[in-house]
Amino acid sequence: MTVLRAGSATDVGRRRANNQDMVLVDDPLFAVADGMGGYAGGEVASSTAIDALRETFGSSPTSEGLEAALLDANAAVQEASRESPDLRNMGTTMVAVALVHEDGADLFAVASIGDSRVYLFRAGELSKLTDDHSVAEELLRSGQISEAEAAVHPQRHMLTRVLGPGGETTPDFQKLVPYAGDRLLLCSDGLYNEVTDREMAEILATVAGPDEAARRLVALANDHGGGDNISVVVIDVVDDGDRAASASRDIGGGPLLSSAERNAALRAIGEDRPPSGGGGAGPGAAHAGPGAARRSDQQIADQNDLDNGRRVGRAGGRVAAGQWSAPLEHDVPARRITGRVVAFLVALVVILAAAVAAIGWYARGSYYVGLRDGTVAIFKGRPGGLLWFQPTVEQTTDLHEAQLPASRAGDVAAGHETTSMAEARRYVANLRDLAGLGATATTTTTVQDPASGSATSTVPPPIVAPAP
Ligand code: MG
């Protein structure tokens, strides 16, 4: 069972006369709406939409219920607009997240329209889940302008889709598999126009309580100028019924980030932080433009991955069944190859290599006198071999097994070990002497390839020295 903990904060900011944003924290439903349409209109639009959203979803707490709730919110804003000339053309953005249960599993259903956003903070990385429905962002997504151009586009704040004005509405919908440790951030543009993605990630990584995290984000936006109303909802997945651990095991990964690892990720982020402006608290002092323009390459790549997996295009404003994008299963954090893992593997290889070398030295570091096809021979290695190191014949003799004195036959049959070739030769000479064959004899010497065991060369026969 998935367990959530959520907090929120909303503030008028430092330049607006009233707060036209509205937040909703009503587990399992969460939302942010950013109203527009004159002094009164925006406030009415956002609150009307939130009320309708809550009512409809409350009667049908499913992903289909969320679709219907967005449509009902749109209709409610339109109806309120028709009832008062002062409220004509009012509208509102909306991002809504609902924890729903489908096919035996818990899922986040995510709806968005306008330029309010939903971010996912998972495994130390912040990803924007939703698309902005603004002129500049639409041009950017269609490839007509660059990210840099979108950041300064004169119509970057002009919205292409909202709840209220016009007829039917076309929200985007997606689903997300929740994992313990995930944080979802819902916000109005008053946050991301003032606070960089890096700063958001920093606060999400370090501030444990969702309420406190939301307040810190709003405070930072005000510190940076507070040019608009600022609204934030933070949702923590505090328990996922062992889903994350199971998924991690399935992909061979380790546990998700602990709080300590999360803090370590944050410190890494902090080291990369650009120096802040020289005391400037103004809106442009430390920021180059809208948050989208300040995304890192990795975040852009992440967003592309998300886009490839979830884009939902719909026409005509009706949300048809089956048009939800697939849950983002692929975004499960996998175990990473860290420096410690590499160091451990290198150390393991060194230890194994040293062990093999030691065994080889022991197995091939001595000689013995034994029998080969009934004839006495000198071998290099250990009698019978050791592991994959087999003895090789270093020298053969003309001394047959039958000629050996009875007192030495068993010793030779078992393999008489010596520490050197010279010692082995003296032992053979002594055997010849005991056998009455004389002190010297001609022998043949065959050097064998230790790897293949086959003869590789033949050298002139040495003379076996007499026993001392
Ligand atoms: Mg706004």
Image: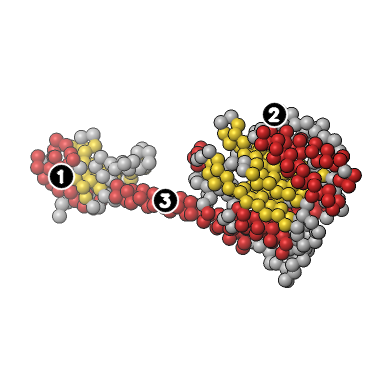
- For mark 3, what is the residue? 348
1 or 3: tag closer to the N-terminus:
3
Q: Residue at x 59, y 57 (%)?
A: 207
Residue 362: in sight, yes or no? yes
Q: Residue at x 81, y 41 (%)?
A: 77
- For mark 1, what is the residue? 432
Q: Nearer the viewer, residue 15 or 351?
A: 15
Contact (CB < 8 A) between labels 2 and 1? no
2 or 1: tag closer to the N-terminus:
2
Which residue of the protein is positioned furthest toward the right in this rendering? Answer: 85
Label 1 and label 3: CA atoms lie apart by 50 Å
- Nearer the observer: mark 1 or 3; the answer is 3
Packing grade of label 2 (10 A; few <14, some 14-19, many >=20) is few
Q: Nearer the viewer, residue 377 or 35?
A: 35
In the picture provided, is 168 more to the left or to the right than 271? Answer: right
Q: Identify which amino acid the numbered label 1 is placed on.
A: Arg
In the picture provided, is 429 more to the left or to the right than 203? Answer: left
Q: Nearer the viewer, residue 274 or 114?
A: 114
Contact (CB < 8 A) between labels 1 and 3? no
Image location (x, y in percent) of residue 44? 80, 47
Q: Residue at x 21, y 44 (%)?
A: 369
**Regarding mark 3 in the picture, which secondary structure is present there?**
helix
Ligand 1 is within 8 Å of the C-beta of the residue at disc 2: no
Image location (x, y in percent) of residue 454? 36, 37
In the picture provided, is 259 more to the left or to the right than 354? Answer: right
- For mark 2, what is the residue? 322
Label 2 and label 1: CA atoms lie apart by 95 Å
Q: Identify which amino acid the numbered label 3 is placed on.
A: Leu
Contact (CB < 8 A) between labels 3 and 2? no
**Regarding mark 2 in the picture, which secondary structure is present there?**
loop
